[in-house]
Image (tube, rainbow, N blue to C red):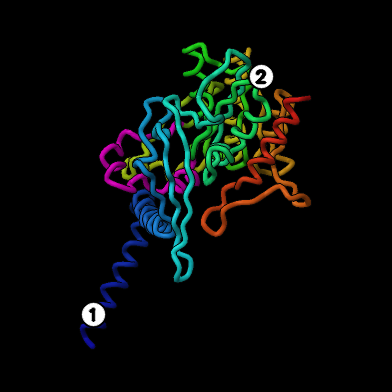
């Protein structure tokens, strides 16, 4: 009994001392430590819930400009999740080219004609869908006279779209039309605030990633007085912990969004831009402003119509029906 009382006394004193250190002596350091403990716990639980695998591995590879991209090749991606006592799984195929684009037609042959390029995240990449089921592939079937390329990829932001356009311009390969994905969740991505960094979890999924982990990074935008600045933060877990405290006010996020889009519009004046509104309220300030400068295509599903499906309970990304709906809405706007 004495040992138990002694242990409890020491434990209580330790807790009191930590609280004192947190609030008085080392506020930032101690709070950071506690925050990291919570984050590591959250990541551990998150990674245990759903497992992803790719054949041939790995799915992600480092990229000197974009931080990371998909490995070129014909890939089989498996999603596995334990639901109750049962292990459920699904798989899909993705064909990724050397230029980072996902296949949008039976062959990768290109015509000397108008180019329409799609930029965005996993929703527009078509995560969970086979190549033929993605919005870009369906759209290519609707416009066989054009070259439609899908440069969207998991976790990408509007910063990635800008960097991709900049790289394409070096090769004289800018599109005539750029379809830019945007949703309210891009606000955190564009500036790499703590919510987005937390959502990333850890890149330490396998030996293949660990060997190259320090090469992975995330580009993000920031404002320096009146200028927009493109910076980067490491995606190697222990190097990126400091970014978990990037609390960016909504007003600053909005400013970053508008400066970033303006930079794209100004640097690539010969490209016509369409904004693909994926998620958000009607009053979204970024969309309200952009609608005065570019065409906005509302891809949000109408609850009164049959426009949405996903891969629940394994994954909540847009399924084949949603992808087809995206394509139809985009086609309608392009034809106007």
Secondary structure beneath disc 1?
Answer: helix
Q: Which residue is mark 2?
A: 272
Considering depth in this image, is 69 or 246 the residue closer to the camera? 69
- Residue 275 shown left or right of residue 204 in the figure: right
**Toward which corner of the image does residue 16 lie, by quadrant?**
bottom left
Q: Please, is residue 24 above or below residue 231 in the view? A: below
Considering depth in this image, is 269 or 318 the residue closer to the camera? 318
Secondary structure beneath disc 2?
Answer: strand
Name the residue rendered at 47%, 50% in the picture.
Answer: 91
Q: How many numbered marks have been drawn onto this rendered protein structure? A: 2
- Residue 106 shown left or right of residue 295 in the figure: left
**Toward which corner of the image does residue 1 lie, by quadrant?**
bottom left
Label 1 to label 2: alpha-carbon separation: 72 Å
Q: Please, is residue 329 above or below residue 144 in the view? A: below
Q: Which residue is mark 1?
A: 6
Considering depth in this image, is 228 or 336 the residue closer to the camera? 336
Residue 98 x, y percent position in the rendering? 41, 26
Residue 239 x, y percent position in the rendering? 32, 40
Mark 1 residue crowding within 10 angstroms, few (<14) / some (14–19) / many (20+): few
Position of the C terminus, as image quadrant, is top right
Name the residue rendered at 53%, 33% in the picture.
Answer: 152
Residue 335 x, y percent position in the rendering? 76, 25
**Residue occupying the far left of the picture:** 3
**Toward which corner of the image does residue 297 lie, by quadrant?**
top right
Dot label at residue 334: none
Considering depth in this image, is 40 or 300 the residue closer to the camera? 300
In the image, the segment drawn in magenta is: 193-219
Q: Please, is residue 126 above or below residue 313 in the view? A: above
Mark 2 residue crowding within 10 angstroms, few (<14) / some (14–19) / many (20+): some
Residue 87 x, y percent position in the rendering? 44, 64
Name the residue rendered at 54%, 21% in the picture.
Answer: 227
């Amino acid at each position: 009994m004495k040992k138990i009382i002694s242990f409890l006394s020491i434990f209580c004193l330790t807790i009191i001392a930590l609280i004192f250190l947190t609030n008085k002596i080392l506020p930032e350091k101690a709070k950071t430590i506690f925050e990291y403990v919570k984050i590591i716990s959250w990541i551990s639980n998150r990674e245990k819930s759903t497992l992803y695998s790719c054949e041939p591995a790995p799915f992600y590879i480092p990229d000197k400009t974009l931080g990371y991209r998909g490995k070129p090749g014909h890939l089989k991606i498996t999603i596995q999740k334990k639901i109750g006592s049962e292990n459920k799984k699904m798989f899909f195929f993705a064909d990724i080219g050397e230029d980072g684009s996902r296949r949008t037609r039976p062959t990768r042959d290109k015509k000397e004609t108008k180019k329409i390029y799609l930029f965005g995240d996993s929703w527009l990449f078509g995560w969970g869908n086979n190549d033929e089921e993605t919005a870009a592939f369906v759209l290519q079937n609707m416009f066989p006279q054009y070259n439609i390329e899908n440069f969207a990829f998991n976790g990408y932001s509007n910063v990635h779209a800008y960097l991709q356009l900049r790289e394409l311009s070096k090769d004289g390969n800018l599109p005539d039309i750029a379809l830019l994905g945007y949703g309210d969740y891009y606000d955190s991505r564009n500036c790499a605030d703590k919510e987005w960094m937390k959502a990333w979890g850890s890149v330490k999924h396998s030996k293949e990633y660990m060997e190259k982990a320090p090469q992975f990074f995330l580009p993000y935008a920031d404002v320096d007085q009146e200028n927009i600045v493109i910076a980067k933060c490491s995606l190697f877990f222990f190097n990126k912990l400091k970014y978990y405290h990037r609390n960016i006010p909504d007003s600053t996020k909005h400013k970053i969004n508008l400066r970033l889009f303006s930079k794209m519009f100004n640097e690539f004046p010969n490209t016509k831009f369409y904004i693909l509104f994926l998620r958000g309220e009607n009053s979204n300030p970024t969309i309200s402003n952009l609608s005065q400068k570019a065409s906005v295509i509302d891809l949000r599903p109408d609850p009164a119509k049959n426009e949405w499906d996903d891969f629940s309970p394994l994954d909540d990304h847009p399924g084949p029906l949603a992808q087809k709906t995206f394509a139809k809405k985009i086609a309608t706007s392009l034809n106007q």
